[in-house]
Amino acid sequence: MGDFLSSVLPPGLIDVLSALIPPVVVATVFCAFVIQLLRKEMAPRRMDGSLVSDEETGAEDAGDKGATKVGETEATNETPIAQGRERTESDGR
């Protein structure tokens, strides 16, 4: 295989390619890691900070993955949430 490449490519180009391959591999792995990390950090989250795509573990894993749970609509704090153009209690001050 090396004889075929040396007969097709100029001699200086083989040296350049062999010198550039390791940095290209390292850069590709680094970019893949950064993209994977950014996708994880930019994933949609709930008000309590948990990922939206996380499912409850345990016996509920055997159920339908697309089913929504009714009990998850509770607010985690006492702050009122304004819907649309509604005003919160602190806006009147």
Image: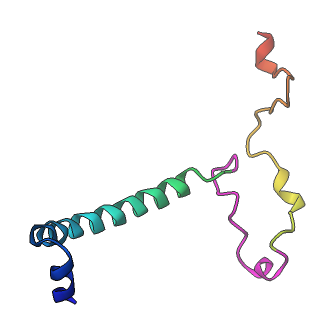
Residue 63, position as x, y percentages in the image = 84, 79
Q: Residue at x 70, y 75 (%)?
A: 57
Asked whether, in this view, residue 76 is left or right of residue 39, the answer is: right
Q: Quadrant of the C terminus?
A: top right
Q: Is residue 89 above or below residue 27?
A: above
Q: Splitting the image into 4 quarters, where does residue 4 fall?
A: bottom left
Q: Residue at x 42, y 63 (%)?
A: 32
The answer to if 68 sits in the magenta stretch is no
Q: What span is in magenta? A: 46-64
Judging from the image, the colouring scheme is rainbow
Front residue of 72 and 19: 19
Asked whether, in this view, residue 14 is left or right of residue 86, the answer is: left
Please identify the residue farthest to the top as the structure is shown: 93
Please identify the residue farthest to the right as the structure is shown: 70
Q: Is residue 54 above or below residue 45?
A: below
Residue 7, position as x, y percentages in the image = 16, 81
Q: Is residue 92 above or below residue 25?
A: above
